[in-house]
Amino acid sequence: MILSNVKIVEAIERELISIAPLPHLRPGDASFNTSAIDLTLGDEILVPREGANITFALREKFSPDFLERNWHSVTITEDQPFKLKPNVLVLGRTAERVRFPVISDGPTYSARVEGRSSHARLGLVVHLTAPTIHANFQGTITLEMVNLGPYPLELTPNIKICQLIIETVEGTPEFTSSQFRGQCAPQGRNG
Amino acid sequence: MPATMALAYIPCEIKKGMFSTEYAVTVRDLSGETISFFADRGLVKTDDRPLLQVRFLGPSTQPPGIVVLLPGSAMDADRRYLHVREDALVSAA
């Protein structure tokens, strides 16, 4: 079930989820749509290094080193926005940190990241194939941004960049086998 | 405060991440297999040896040890839990 703006605020107030910072925690605030919450762009953009003659074989084991080596970080400001050219992929992050804890005796939530319709008309894609924020996630949300439009788009910090649609997870997630269900403390105690 | 699963820490290796606010984290399974992913710096203690914040899931019999929930998906294995030795688990208290 998708949460309405009222239910999103309730879930934050009950500490079932966390999204911060938010300017105001009111369903009628500009950050909230009827069934989603807008998140804003942080000030760090990762850009692929140009001119590198690189091929990554997908059969190889994933290497964080490979990504760290071949991308560089750019800090954006109001005065120094990042100009995202057509058909270029960059990575960004939301300014807000989110937390979706797995709660042993209560509702658990997950979320999906979606773009904004106004930006979509300009050709901006904000996530690629990985829109789900799973239960137990904690941190800022990484955005895989591509400009599929005809002209460059300027990215500045704090612009509304994506929306988060929050849903209830029915039942307590089971991660391995049923022997762990309901256990939430060392030694297998409920607590 | 709702009852979330207990926090714990496990040893990890860290390197610089892609974003300035994250580490590239590598953890080791009971089998010796290494799993790597990016984690927010707030989830890693670096006081002495690096320790990654995880959620305790429970004991496992096959293989014998402890199962913990990782704070993100392992990017090379698409899994979110890890079997570790019981004595590798560090209490969050």
Image (cartoon, grey):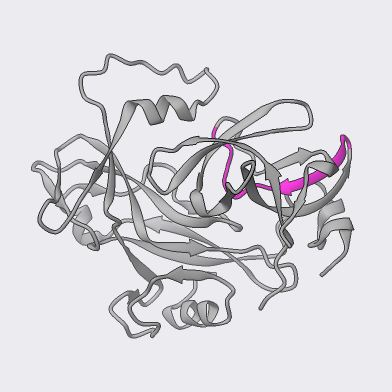
In the displayed structure, B83 sits above or below A111; it is above
Q: Where's the C terminus of chain A, which quadrant?
A: bottom right
Part of the protein shown in magenta = B62-75
Tell me the residue at 81%/61% (across/down): A185
Whether A60 is drawn above or below B64: the answer is above
Residue A165's x, y, as percent?
Answer: 43, 65
Q: Determine if the magenta segment contains residue B69.
A: yes
Percent coordinates x, y for residue A119 in the rendering: 20, 56
Position of B51 relative to A5 (above/below): above
Residue A66 left/right relative to B83: left
> Where's residue A2, x and y in %?
50, 70
Residue B28 magenta = no
Looking at the rendering, which quadrant does residue A88 occupy? top left
Q: Along the horizontal axis of the image, is B78 left or right of A139? A: right
Q: Measuring 64% from the left and 39% from the top, which residue is drawn there?
A: B79
Q: Quadrant of residue A186?
A: bottom right
Say which residue appears at 88% left-offset and 58% top-offset. Answer: A188
Q: Within the image, what quadrant is residue A87 found in?
A: top left
